[in-house]
Image (cartoon, helix red, strand yellow):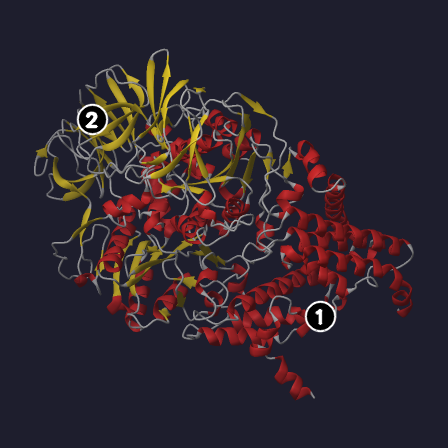
Amino acid sequence: MKGVSYKTVGQVTNILLFVEGIENASYNELVEISVQDGRTINGQILSTSKNVSVIQVFGETYGIDSQNTKVTLSGTTAKMSVGMDMVGRVFDGLGRPRDGGAPIVSEKKMDINGSPINPYAREEPSEFIQTGISAIDGMNTLVRGQKLPIFSGSGMQHNKLVAQIVGQATTRSKDKDFYVVFCGMGINSEEANFFMEEFKRNGSMKNTVAFINLSSEPSMERLMLPRLALTAAEYLAYEKDFHVMVILTDMTNYCEALREISAARLEVPGRRGYPGYMYTDLASIYERAGKLKEKKGSITQVPVLTMPVDDITHPIPDLTGYITEGQIVLSRSMDKSGIYPNIDVLLSLSRLMNQGIGKNKTREDHKQLSDQLYAAYAKGKELRSLMKIVGEEALSDTDKRYLSFADAFEKRFINQDYSDNRKVEETLDIGWELLSMLDISEIERIKEDMIKKYGKWKQKQQQAS
Amino acid sequence: MSGKITRISGAVISAEGLEDPKMNNIVNVGEKKLIGEIVKIIGDQAIIQVYEEVSGLRVGEPVEDTGSRLSVELGPGLIGSIFDGIQRPLDKLLQKSGDFIQSGINAEPLDRKKKWHFLAKVKQGAQLEEGQEIGEVQETSLVKHKILVPPGISGKVLNVKSGDFTLDDTIAVVENNGKKTEIKMVQKWPVRQARPVKEKLPPVIPLITGQRVIDTFFPVAKGGTASIPGPFGSGKTVVSHQLARWSDADIIVYVGAGERGNEMTEILTSFPDLKDPKTGEPLMDRTILIANTSNMPVTGREASIYTGVTIAEYFRDMGYSVALMADSTSRWAEALREISQRLEEMPGEEGYPAYLSKRISEFYEMAGRCRLLNGKIGSITLIGAVSPPGGDISEPVSQNTLRATRVFWALDASLANSRHFPAINWLNSYSLYLEQLDGWYRENIADDWPGLRDGMIALLQREAEINEIVQLVGYDAISEKDKLVLDIAKAIREAFLQQNAFDEVDTFSSIKKQYLMLKAIQRLNDVESSLVEGGATVEQLQSTDVKQRLFRFKFVKEEEVESYSKELMKLIDGLSKSKPKEGART
């Protein structure tokens, strides 16, 4: 019941509080814990019964005792005040401003856990998003309402890539551009500063709502952070009709916090100590992306995670890949050879690509061209490893052409400048240009009329003759 | 009498004060009347599994026993619907609560106002047994919904009439020993209870799916069981969708358990436009969807599989062949694990409950080709997708599934990465129905079918062996005969096994087309083998025209396959004549 306080703390652990005799506490209700030293800490009811209620504490538990600590029910589950004045602001894991500004005061309060979207209400995402990055636009196209994560590793340049996507993302329709919701979970202050500086520099900050939980801040708030961010996104998308891109970084930190809290709750651990419900928990975040039939706005998610030891079968990338609609995988070896963005095109995949490309969306030749580029690059890479065994002399002329194609594909198509914002036509034209390094008879996946219309062989032949 | 909530810990709550609570009874929980099921009883405490989000629920709120078990409503109106795990119709929930599913919202699974045209098939005075057909309703263009005497009821027909009725109208009255029973077009059936049949029969007819690698090499029988384990990105969902699209079953039940919301949307948007290859009618007219996506309550995910099976059994009882796809059974098993942990049960392997194995085998045992109560034959084919963590099938769900199913379609990440789709590995996969089905293939396709198929599989296996040698000694060092094996195996892989689900023609291959394609490959192998024996080298045999035509075969429309095949065969036969010339050239 709202406002009622209890001084009946029984047991205290480093994140849990067992309080006796709470009446009418509701499941997931927020509470305030007043400690003798004057601090107030937030908490949430994890389980409640007639005798004992278990409270999850969001902050440091030092100073909590069974004599003087007072627990007050708030009467509500976790809700967040939302309004257009969130835009341009930075908040923490409890929704408090961390930019020194005033808190958001609004009549409109939304449950941060949201509710599952009725599958019948969804519309299939199909609108092309131009990120200006060839390896994404050309080969693994992102569409509005998709959830497409970036699988990175420690020490790779995923932050730069994310900042570039945020700065460049645009669509071809005339309606308003993206709003960005940035959710930085357990990132360090340098990373946080980098993003904020970049967003200010490229002008996206005025359309951004940022949520940041630094690595030194409570783990429990880290678990709240994406839920706050997505609630803000849902407000912008479904109440205000905007298209929203949500950046979630770093999901690995989120999952570590999930494991930490689960262990503290003495739950039975699943694979590698992560809780058995991690799939469901991640789904409750990722599935909040989408496009609804009856609403103009949409939520596109670009989660970022660092794969421990670059292992794609680790539970975090594994469970993520089972939920998201594809993945952009970054490559260690390409990073080492100085290619930016170091996107491994062969391991990456966008499941919704086919819906978002083609005539009237990108260009009619897009699908066939990207299939051909994929096949040729795959062949070139295969020959590259073969060459290491048998030597270059053993390869035929055709093989050698594939080899130089693969090199050029990495250097000219994938590789691009941080400030290089390529139109999709430009991306496709580079693709055609590179294909002309191969003999025209090697082109199996593109129909003749497309070759005639877009191919770059003709000019060469003319020059030669 | 209503009880009171005494404890809430996630989706499992305790209540006391219920008068004589019974296991598996459905209760209304709290002021919002959330749907719950009693799963454990300790003294006067009832432990309840709640099927909806419990945030905000308080200790002390009321709990009411409905006195009935979790049931599915069965009757006209099922086809073309999309339900959640406990059969709430998602389209009606949308009207009631908007784009998001709210707790405490409920709706009748079937439309009670709609009138269906019922055509009586029996006359007054007829003696009816349980399961016998009383009449039928043309539910959709593809499905005649048969109205049967419910199990446990029999007697003399006192009254029956054709006409337009709602589900609540009585269409017949049956009398047995003075006891009159009104029969309606709708009935309820508890979800966890199997519907009775007379006996199970051996499955001897293949489920033709139009997918070449499945129909030819690893077929599943109507009434059989199959599993599709594979890591993410290996195309599990595409295979499941293809089976739902093109299988020659009469009814398709597609259960999306804990999967992506957008995938269900894809089915909902694409199926009404896709045409059944046999009749040209929309595929949605034989399809029922159960969608409990990954972000909906896990308790509903657990129930969704049983809801799907009960609906499948209901249509089987009409004499139909039903195919049920469950994507993904791993997510269902995870739901079992989560609920088990909340119930504080002793965990088994990897935290899964000790009864995981039993539940999985129980589920697949619901498949079968059955002699029905009315003497007819109906079947349920169960196809379960499995999502092993990291693609490693040594984990409990995969292993228990392999023991319970008879067909294994092994999806392979490396095949998917090289864009070989469907990424079903031909060396690891198996079908234990091959021999049982050979008779059907011999009778309906061609007498040489089994031999043809075995020959092709042997070639693919030989290819794998040769490739190991090639890794060691290099391609140039192997014999011309072995080179030919590699060449033909490549043709099998690329011209036959690879199938493009997104190509209008290639997405479905009739079994006849599959046969003709295999025959062409076999003929090419025979001709080239004799040429190689005669001294030709494989390099000399690279006749691009024949190969190209072989590779293009898959894109040939069904009406043209016969003439295309004839021409191709002629070209292949022609190779042996032109050989000396080509040989002389080099």
Residue nearest the observer in this picture, A220 or B340 = B340
Give amino acid for label 2. Val
Looking at the image, residue A229 lies above or below residue A366: above
Residue nearest the observer in this picture, B250 or A122 = B250
Q: Residue B352 carries which label?
A: none
Question: Of all residues shown, which one is farthest toward the front?
Answer: B124
Q: In which quarter of the image is residue B12?
A: top left
Give amino acid for label 1. Thr
Q: Position of residue A114 (x, y in %)?
A: 26, 47
Q: Is residue A336 left or right of residue A16?
A: right
In which quadrant will I find the C terminus of chain B?
bottom right
In which quadrant will I find the N terminus of chain B?
top left
Looking at the image, residue A202 lies above or below residue B303: below
Q: In this view, does A390 lie to the left or right of A186?
A: right
Q: Which residue corresponds to mark 2?
A: B63
Chain where mark 1 sits: A
Mark 1: few/some/many CA within 10 Å (<14, 14-19, 20+): few
Q: Where is residue A89 in the image (x, y as percent from the top left)?
A: 21, 62
Q: Where is residue B160 in the image (x, y as percent from the top left)?
A: 37, 27
Pair 2/1: label in front? 2
Chain where mark 2 sits: B
Looking at the image, residue B315 lies above or below residue A362: above
Q: Is residue B368 left or right of residue A318?
A: right
For label 1, the SS is helix
Say if residue A35 shows up in the picture: no
Mark 2: few/some/many CA within 10 Å (<14, 14-19, 20+): many
For label 2, the SS is strand
Distance (Cα) linking label 2 and label 1: 75 Å
Q: Please tell me if label 2 and label 1 are on a single chain.
A: no
Q: Which residue corresponds to mark 1?
A: A398
Q: Position of residue A221 (x, y in %)?
A: 26, 47
